[in-house]
């Protein structure tokens, strides 16, 4: 009966679609929660329904439960389709709004550009007249002709340059008008809106036609996931889709879908950070170490410039969009900061404030001294010599953007292998300090979250300001981290001070 009802997708309000989708999903949850009594009756754990009538009642209960489960399945599927459609509408609207803002700026610049072209053309006419006048003098004045001809040539070059600027300007206006048309779901746009609508329509029609009563399903699979195709459709609509990709770009898009990052945020990141497949080139050729949660770390190569090391650290954050979810899953004590363009900007500002740590520590690698980039846009290292051993006191210490683990002499003078073992183990190493911290057993992601907050403190207070404040707090607290505001801010549990 439901299959006979035509589905007309909502065409305007993405929030309305999202609300409707969430409503269907909530109905499915309510239906599923009511099934327990029916399942209990059908199972008859007490054996009280052994009569013929009891057996019939159990069969009916089992059939009703199966039918209700199918109804819940339909509701979840409809809800997931509408939710996915709302994401498409939201992405389309963001493209439209951005294009509209660009058009306002471009339109404001048009009169000035047009005026410059007209003025340049006037200069060409003026100097053409001067050349003619100089040539018609009796006797002709060669110097006057030469100067006027030179200035005429300059005026013609200026005119051609301004015409080129004008042409590019109006081509950009046309491009932004197309973006607005194809992105504006309120103005009858295509692309994202229609693609999302077709996907939702097909999903809902198929579930009405193809789902037998009582079909088993996994509810978590029915909320429409974002796909790489969704990302590329949004990037294409925004004029940001690269003509070709590379392995790291493809892996990044796969990571985005696995982490469920909204398409609109991906478009914003690509646009605001000017990301292209070449942006990941700084990670090419670097050895990758993979943690149990799938996060990727990259081994810094000797000879890399401080700027490239900083960029590699930033790109490692961008490459690992699921780090915030992994922090929450590992029991981190703070609400995770969502993966976003705003977080990328914050990391860039932190890196700039802590640039001294890249210029100093990040260059002193090789042999037992090794550094990896982390999913938090920081560095983690082990080793001694060049002052590293003295710096990595107690369980380890953060200096600017560099977290030095207190393993002064790695086995076989091979710091890279030690770091790989730590990353593959997924846990901070066992080192107990004088303040009672034993980070061993703490999830590595959680430990790095704690240390990244120390990096933020360095950026805020400066190298000397942080050192003076931390030393004073440690002295006053008698080494009790629980009484030190800098450690409390970074998270006592995350830092291994609470067990």
Image: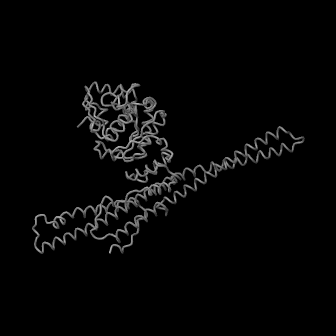
The picture places residue 254, in percent across and down from the top left corner, at 41, 52
> Which quadrant of the figure contains the C terminus?
top left
Position above or below: 27 against 241: below
- Seen from this angle, which residue lies furthest right? 139
Q: Residue shown at 16%/65% (left/top)?
A: 43
Q: Which quadrant of the rendered structure holds the N terminus?
A: bottom left
- Report which quarter residue 319 is drawn in: top left
Q: Can residue 19 be seen?
A: yes
Query: Which residue is rendered at x = 43% and y = 53% of the image?
Result: 264
Spot occupied by residue 189 in the image (x, y as percentages of width and height): 49, 62
Q: Position of residue 156 (x, y in %)?
A: 73, 46
State the count of labels: 0
Decide: is 437 above or below 289.
Answer: above
User: Which of the 4 image quadrants contains residue 374?
Assistant: top left
Coordinates of residue 238 in the picture (x, y in percent) = 50, 54
Q: How is the image coloured?
A: one colour
Front residue of this view, candidates 483 and 218:
218
Q: Nearer the viewer, residue 143 or 389?
A: 389
Compare residues 456 and 372 and report the one nearer the observer: 372
Whether residue 459 can be seen here: no
Give the image quarter of residue 380. Answer: top left
Q: Is residue 95 shown left or right of residue 404?
A: right
Residue at the extreme front of the image, as rendered: 412
């Amino acid at each position: 009966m439901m299959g006979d009802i035509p589905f007309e997708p909502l065409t305007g309000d993405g929030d309305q679609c999202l609300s409707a989708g969430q409503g269907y999903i909530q109905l499915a949850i309510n239906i599923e929660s009511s099934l327990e009594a029916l399942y209990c009756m059908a199972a008859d754990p007490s054996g009280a329904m052994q009569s013929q009538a009891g057996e019939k009642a159990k069969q009916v209960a089992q059939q009703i439960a199966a039918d209700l489960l199918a109804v819940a399945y339909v509701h979840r599927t409809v809800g997931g389709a509408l939710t996915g459609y709302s994401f498409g509408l939201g992405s389309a609207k963001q493209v439209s709004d951005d294009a509209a803002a660009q058009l306002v700026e471009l339109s404001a610049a048009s009169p000035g550009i047009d005026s410059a072209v007209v003025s340049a053309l006037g200069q060409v006419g003026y100097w053409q007249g001067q050349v003619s006048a100089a040539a018609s003098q009796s006797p002709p004045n060669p110097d006057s002709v030469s100067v006027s001809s030179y200035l005429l040539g300059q005026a013609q070059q200026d005119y051609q340059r301004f015409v080129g600027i004008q042409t590019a300007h109006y081509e950009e206006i046309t491009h932004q008008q197309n973006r607005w048309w194809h992105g504006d779901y309120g103005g009858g746009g295509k692309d994202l809106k229609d693609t999302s609508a077709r996907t939702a329509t097909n999903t809902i029609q198929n579930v009405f036609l193809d789902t037998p009563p009582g079909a088993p399903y996994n509810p978590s699979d029915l909320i429409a996931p974002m796909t790489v195709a969704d990302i590329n459709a949004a990037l294409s609509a925004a004029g940001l889709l690269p003509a070709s990709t590379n392995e790291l770009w493809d892996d990044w898009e796969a990571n985005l879908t696995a982490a469920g990052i909204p398409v609109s945020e991906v478009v914003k990141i690509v646009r605001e950070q000017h990301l292209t497949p070449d942006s990941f080139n700084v990670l090419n050729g670097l050895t990758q170490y993979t943690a149990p949660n799938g996060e990727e770390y990259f081994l810094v190569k000797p000879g890399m410039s401080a700027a490239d090391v900083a960029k590699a650290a930033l790109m490692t954050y961008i490459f690992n969009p699921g780090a915030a979810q992994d922090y929450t899953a590992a029991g981190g004590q703070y609400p995770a900061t969502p993966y976003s363009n705003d977080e990328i900007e914050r990391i860039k500002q932190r890196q700039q404030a802590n640039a001294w740590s890249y210029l100093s520590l990040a260059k002193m690698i090789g042999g037992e001294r090794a550094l990896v980039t982390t999913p938090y846009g920081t560095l983690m290292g082990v080793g001694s010599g060049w002052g590293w051993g003295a710096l990595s006191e107690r369980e380890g210490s953060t200096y600017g953007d560099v977290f030095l683990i207190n393993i002064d002499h790695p086995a076989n003078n091979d710091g890279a292998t030690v770091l790989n073992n730590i990353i593959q183990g997924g846990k901070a190493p066992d080192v107990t300090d004088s303040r009672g911290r034993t980070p061993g057993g703490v999830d590595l992601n959680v430990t790095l979250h704690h240390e990244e907050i120390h990096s933020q403190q360095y950026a805020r207070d400066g190298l000397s300001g942080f050192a003076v404040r931390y030393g004073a707090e440690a002295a006053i607290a008698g080494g009790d981290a629980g009484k030190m505001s800098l450690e409390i801010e970074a998270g006592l549990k995350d830092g291994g001070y609470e067990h």
